[in-house]
Image (cartoon, rainbow, N blue to C red):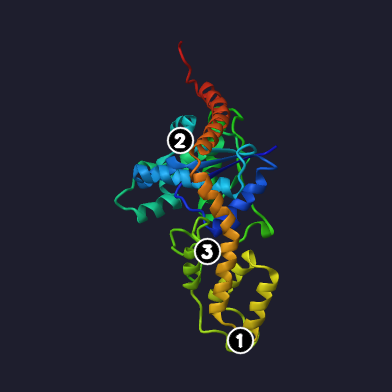
Amino acid sequence: MPTVVSGIRSTGNLHLGNYFGAVKNFIEMQHHHDTYFFIADLHSLTTHPVPQHLYGNVKQVLAEYLACGIDPEKATVFIQSDVPEVSELYLLMNMNAYLGELERTTSFKDKARQQPDNVNAGLLTYPVLMAADIIIHKANLVPVGKDQEQNLEMSRTFARRFNRMYNVELFPIPRPYVFEGQDMVKIPGLDGSGKMGKSEGNAISLADAPSVIRKKVMKAVTDSGPTEPNQQKPEVIQNLFTLLDVVSTPDVVAHFDLEYNQCSIRYGDLKKQLAEDIVKFTDPIRLRIEALLADDVYLSKVAKLGAEKARASASKTLQEVREVIGVKKFY
């Protein structure tokens, strides 16, 4: 059975774009692969979050993924910092990572521009920590978005380099896990362009209250309306129909599509319907999130179980790495 490793950002608040993008595929993946899903709290330290935010965000993300359907009995769900073996492998892999190649990574250059007063070593060596996260479980497959493709390629480079330097075949070379066809839906933002994202301020979070969802949707960008029958929808309007497609019934989509083609559509009515259908879709997830956030005992149990499973895998690999390198105890 192939091993899949995927990191989860620890910034809190999954939104519809996350759900219809990666999360639905994670839910399916856990039934067919040996899956490791970790909340990347160590990675987030590159932005220097305050302690209460770091802890609160990790708790929120853990509750949200569980509420969406990730099963800790089927998948290994853990918090990155609960597996210290990752940090040690990160240190060891840094010895075989070179300044020039790290400085050339797009993610480093982008982050350095975004936070010029906080260009720390963690930003520079981010790809090495990512590689350690992946190869410590000997992953075969890694689901990645466009923004992480280069970092995954560096993980492949580091795995090959280690195998070559020490003349071993310890690490498999991880491949990108590609979601095909309708398995991956790009959810647009409410601002009329691009994709839904928390940092862009155009997202509907799965934990949003119904009143918040209604307010956000009613502010969604539209145009002045169609002027000719059956004209092509501009991007800002097609975005609303894309959202309708994923949360509404086919007859609702067909109704508003006909009204648009007949130039009789009222965007206010479309938005009201869309908002109610989003509320209907997200409400069960939101209620599960709230229940999980209130159950510290269960979240602790999940985190402990995940840490134990992840450490069992990680410690075995780390011991093999130590022996290959020659880091051995004298007692």
Q: Identify residue for label 3.
A: 195
The type of residue carrying mark 2 is: Ser
Q: Residue at x 49, y 59 (%)?
A: 208
Q: Identify residue for label 2.
A: 81
Discs 2, 3 touching: Cβ within 8 Å: no
Q: Return the x and y of residue 232 as percentages of the image width and height.
A: 62, 81
| Mark 1 vs mark 3, CA separation in Å | 28 Å
- Position above or below: 279 against 298: below
Label 1 secondary element: loop
Q: Residue at x 60, y 66 (%)?
A: 277
Q: Nearer the viewer, residue 302 or 123?
A: 302
- Local packing at callout 2 (Cα closer than 10 Å; few below 14, some 14-19, many 20+) is some
Camera-near label (1 vs 3) is 1
Q: Return the x and y of residue 63 as percentages of the image width and height.
A: 52, 45
Quadrant of res 272? bottom right
Discs 2, 1 touching: Cβ within 8 Å: no
Q: Nearer the viewer, residue 163 or 224?
A: 224
Q: Residue at x 68, y 60 (%)?
A: 182
Label 2 secondary element: helix
Quadrant of res 240? bottom right
- Local packing at callout 1 (Cα closer than 10 Å; few below 14, some 14-19, many 20+) is some
| Mark 2 vs mark 1, CA separation in Å | 56 Å
- Local packing at callout 3 (Cα closer than 10 Å; few below 14, some 14-19, many 20+) is some
The type of residue carrying mark 3 is: Lys
The type of residue carrying mark 1 is: Ser
Q: Nearer the viewer, residue 296 or 249?
A: 296
Task: Kindly identify which numbered label has been placed on residue 264.
Answer: 1
